[in-house]
Amino acid sequence: MGEYDLHSLILACDFRVDDVDRMWKWLKKHGDPLAAIGAHHVVLYTSIWEPGRVLVTIGIRHAHSIRDVLRSPAIFEWFDIAGADDIPPVFGGEVVEKIDLYGPSPEDHVGRVIVGVMAAVGDLAVLMAKVHGGAERFKRSGVRKIWVYRALDDGREVMILQEIQDEVTARQWIEHPDAAAEWMSHAGLGGYPSQFVGRFTHLMTIDGQG
């Protein structure tokens, strides 16, 4: 997660594809419809443990554009091209906080693992207080960054992206997370997907001001 990710509004979708490269080539050819509705970056992460599973995040300039994206025929065509059997849930949210536990690094992405969780939490303010209180423990466990997004249509629904030192450390964190990372135990409950574990794969910058 580098500087291009510093958007405050995000669309995210966790789903499975038949051919990741084919889907990405299609997306690169269809940047204009995304630019027209205020998108500025598309980031693709691919799972390291589940072949074909991807997490795609789209940075959005305006809150109203999120609704436009969800109504756009392009998104249905995108999932069709990707080979998805059904339209997967799409998370639309705004940033709550981006916590960089180590500061900027010239080697961002190198060997790093992204752990993404979409879940409902009891009290977001309490959760964030726990995160800040446990920051040093998180660092010792290999967590480098924690980015928290809150759904625009439900203040209790969050997406949390964590950048972990490496794959071995990520597995240890997933199996034995800190108690303050309560969202880890909520992954996969209800209609939410299981936690996503992957690596940065592609970035597309979209021109235009929306």
Image (cartoon, grey):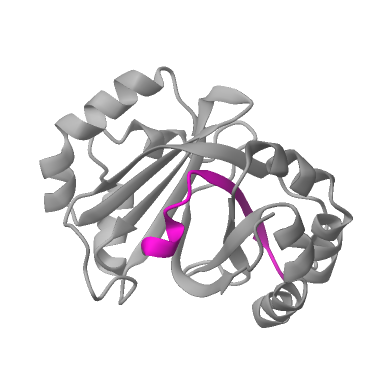
Using the image as rendered, state which of residue 203 and residue 80 is in the foreground. 203
The picture places residue 133, in percent across and down from the top left corner, at 16, 30
Q: Quadrant of the C terminus?
A: bottom right
Asked whether 178 or 152 is in front, the reply is 152
Residue at the spot x=24%, y=25% of the render?
129
> Is 165 left or right of 74, judged from the image as shown?
left
Q: Can residue 1 be seen here?
A: no
x%, y% of residue 74? 84, 60
Left or right: 94, with 23 as reference point: left
Residue 51, picture quadrant: bottom right
Most extreme residue toward the front is 209
In percent of width and height, residue 149 lies at 47, 38
- Residue drawn at x 76%, y 48% is 69
- Quadrant including the N terminus: bottom left
- Which residues lie in the magenta part? 3-17
- Callout count: 0
Whether residue 127 is visible to the viewer of this picture, yes or no, is yes
Q: Is residue 10 magenta?
A: yes
State yes or no: residue 180 in magenta: no
- Vertical comparison of 42 with 12: above or below: below
Query: Which quadrant of the figure has residue 114?
Result: bottom left
Of residue 177 and residue 4, the one placed in the foreground of this image is: 4
> Going 75% across and 39% down the picture, which residue do you hit?
67
Q: Residue at x 44, y 63 (%)?
A: 4
**For residue 204, which quarter of the picture?**
bottom right
Side of 20 relative to 129 (left or right): right
Q: Position of residue 116 (x, y in %)?
A: 45, 50
